[in-house]
Image (spheres, rainbow, N blue to C red):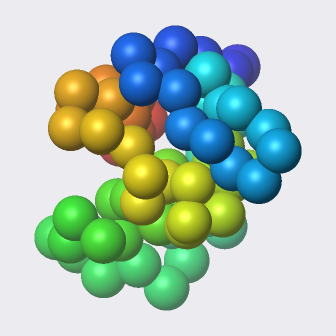
Amino acid sequence: MELTVKLSEPIQFGSETIAELKFRKPKAKDFRGLQMPLSMGALLDLAGHLAAQPKSVIDELGLADTKKVLEVIGDFL
């Protein structure tokens, strides 16, 4: 299962323009080492991991896109 979030504000990363993020379904190993309740930073790190994107890409998300990404991560929890 994979979920895609189309970004309302595409991100420029080097020479690449990222217009969508594709999130794979997490496995138990993705949650190893996370402490509950999850902090905002932990949720964003998990989002980057599941989308195979570095923190520097996730850090550039606009507020509306961050909300969409957090909703996707929330659906996985």
Q: Residue at x 49, y 85 (%)?
A: 33
Q: Residue at x 66, y 63 (%)?
A: 54
Q: Where is residue 44 shown, x and y percent of the image?
A: 39, 59
Circle count: 0
Q: Residue at x 21, y 38 (%)?
A: 63
Q: Where is residue 16 shown, x and y percent of the image?
A: 79, 39
Q: Residue furthest right?
A: 15
Q: Residue furthest front?
A: 15
Quarter residue 51 falls in: top right
Quarter residue 64 falls in: top left
Residue 69 placement, left or right of 48: left
Residue 9 appears in the figure: yes
Position of 47 relative to 11 (above/below): below
State which quarter of the image contains the C terminus: top left
Position of 47 relative to 72 (above/below): below
Residue 52 placement, left or right of 23: right
User: Front-most of 70 and 74?
Assistant: 70
User: Front-most of 52 and 65?
Assistant: 65
State which quarter of the image contains the N terminus: top right
Residue 16 placement, left or right of 29: right
Position of 38 relative to 69 (above/below): below
Q: Where is residue 57 shown, x and y percent of the image?
A: 57, 54
Q: Where is residue 55 shown, x and y percent of the image?
A: 55, 67
Position of 51 relative to 5 (above/below): below
Residue 25 appears in the figure: no
